[in-house]
Image (cartoon, rainbow, N blue to C red):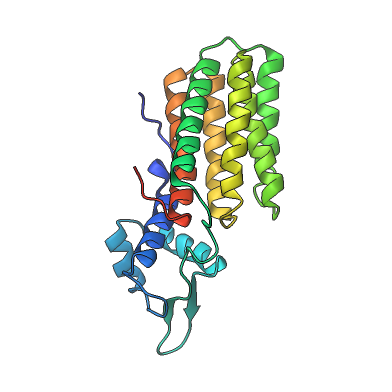
Amino acid sequence: MAQPTTGRPNNVFEQTIARLLRAIRLGQYLVGDKLPAERELAADLGVSRATLRQALGELHTAGIVEVRRGRYGGTFVTALPSAEAGGGVDPTELSDALAFRRILECAAARITAGRELGADERSRLRAAEAACAAERDSTSAEHFRALDSRFHLCIAELTGIPSLVQAAATTRDRVNAYLNQIPFIHTNITHACAQHHELMEAILKGDPETAEALAAQHAEGTEELLRGFLELQSE
């Protein structure tokens, strides 16, 4: 499978969020503890300080850490990530939904990129991508996820395989139910919209291998966040 060239390879932001959540959940940093200095923590995680700041900013918004100023200031853990998220989650069912989603969306991207799309079909895909991108700053998780689903289902519809469309719609609904249990993270949304654009371009250029690889990378970002917030281990 071809490896796509993207501005943020391997979902580094989402992976950083997940690793911080696991460290807190596993007791490496307890509630009330001060996190290591930014430079040290970024080095430990193997990420840039800019990425770390973004991740900590989202955890602050989620109420998991807080920044205190002054002589004894720093970033402190204020809550366990599992305190409000993940109640009643069946790990087997979630893993099944995520795995099936990846299979379906990778297949849809490859098949659609391999088709000779007509002008109307190409316009439909562009319109779905643009509508989602226009809502990247939305404060409504439900509205954005509806447009996000519409974009992915448009790709499935362009395969011309009705049963694939039906399966994709059912699976998106399953995954969205889990997404509704975690914070709405705007940095992740911006990243997702950039990935949508790259995926669309690969399809329109007729590059099945890159389209499939981009679809897989996009799915992995969602998986990282869900596994991090819902207390599931990466496979």
Q: How many marks?
A: 0
Q: Residue at x 61, y 51 (%)?
A: 180
Q: Is 68 drawn above or below residue 5 in the view shown?
A: below
Q: Position of residue 115 (x, y in %)?
A: 55, 11
The answer to whether any part of residue 129 appears in the image is: no
Q: Residue, x 51% and y 13% (percent of image)?
A: 114
In this rendering, the answer to whether 37 lies above or below 42 is below
41 lies left or right of 191? left
Apparent side of residue 107 relative to residue 172 in the rendered image (left or right)? left
Residue 195 appears in the rendering: yes
For the N terminus, the quadrant is top left
Q: Which residue appears at 46% of the width and 65% of the height?
A: 56
Q: Residue 93, relative to residue 184: is it above or below?
A: above
The residue sitting at 31% across, 59% down in the picture is 45
Q: Quadrant of residue 159?
A: top right
Q: Nearer the viewer, residue 232 or 212?
A: 232
Q: Residue 37, located in which quarter of the rendered image?
A: bottom left
Residue that lies at the very extreme toward the bottom in this rendered image: 71
Q: Position of residue 93 (x, y in %)?
A: 48, 40
* Relative image position of residue 98 (x, y in whole percent): 48, 37
Q: Is residue 55 above or below residue 119?
A: below
| Residue 121 drawn at (x, y percent) | 68, 17
Quadrant holding the C terminus: top left
Work out whether residue 103 or residue 91 is closer to the camera in this orientation and state it.
91
User: Observer-nearest residue: 178 or 200?
Assistant: 178
